[in-house]
């Protein structure tokens, strides 16, 4: 289901109400695995949201990576993998963080990845600071 087409700023509440109601109705019929609702971003059009909160522009940061330096190790003896894993139930995921508009989603994503791997390896979920990574990066620029 695609996002609603917004004609004007006044259309946003009604269009998103319709979108949310349709999605949740489909959820009740088993077509989705989650429900949705309004949040603090619902009053933005898709274009406004992108402009304000999607700070990373990949065209400004493209690099060639040598993929020969990376390898994937697969344990062939364990070929019965589950269809899905809910890492929240395994205690490997912290709560969602509101990153604001700082454009440092890479720092928060890096922290989340390290937190999850640490919890998996050590049985204890820790909380790292994405903003600290960001601040250290801008100090070096």
Image (cartoon, rainbow, N blue to C red):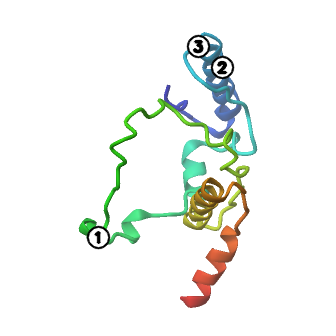
Q: Secondary structure at mark 3?
A: loop
User: Which of the numbered marks, if any, corresponds to residue 69?
Assistant: 1
Q: Secondary structure at mark 2?
A: helix
Residue depicted at x 62% and y 61%: 118
Q: Nearer the viewer, mark 1 or mark 3?
A: 1
User: Does residue 54 lie above or below 24 as drawn?
Assistant: below
The local crowd at label 1, few if under 14, some if 14 to 19, many if 20 or more residues have their Cα within 10 Å, is: few
* Inter-mark Cα distance, 2 to 1: 45 Å
Q: Position of residue 80 (x, y in %)?
A: 41, 32
In primary-sequence order, the first of circles 2 and 1 is: 2
* Inter-mark Cα distance, 1 to 3: 43 Å
**Quarter of the view holding residue 100:** bottom right
Q: Which residue is mark 2?
A: 24
Q: Position of residue 88 (x, y in %)?
A: 67, 42
The local crowd at label 3, few if under 14, some if 14 to 19, many if 20 or more residues have their Cα within 10 Å, is: few
Q: Which residue is mark 3?
A: 30
In primary-sequence order, the first of circles 1 and 3 is: 3
Nearer to the camera, 116 or 22:
116
Where's the C terminus, which quadrant?
bottom right
Q: Position of residue 66 (x, y in %)?
A: 26, 70
* Inter-mark Cα distance, 2 to 3: 10 Å
Direction from residue 5 to residue 127 in the image, left or right: right
Residue depicted at x 64% and y 68%: 102
Direction from residue 141 to residue 92 in the image, left or right: right
User: Does residue 57 lie above or below 26 as drawn?
Assistant: below
User: Does residue 116 lie above or below 139 as drawn?
Assistant: above
In primary-sequence order, the first of circles 2 and 3 is: 2
């Amino acid at each position: 289901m695609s996002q609603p087409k917004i004609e004007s700023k006044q259309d946003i509440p009604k269009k998103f109400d319709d979108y949310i109601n349709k999605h949740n109705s489909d959820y009740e019929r088993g077509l989705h695995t989650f429900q949705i609702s309004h949040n603090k971003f619902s009053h933005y059009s898709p274009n406004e949201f992108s402009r304000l909160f999607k700070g990373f522009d990949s065209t400004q940061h493209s690099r060639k990576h040598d993929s020969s330096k990376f390898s994937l190790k697969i344990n062939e003896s364990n070929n019965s993998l589950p269809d899905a894993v809910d890492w929240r139930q395994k205690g490997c995921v912290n709560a969602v963080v509101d990153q604001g508009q700082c454009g440092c989603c890479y720092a928060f994503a890096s922290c989340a990845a390290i937190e999850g791997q640490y919890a998996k390896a050590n049985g204890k979920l820790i909380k790292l600071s994405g903003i600290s990574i960001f601040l250290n990066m801008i100090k070096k620029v």
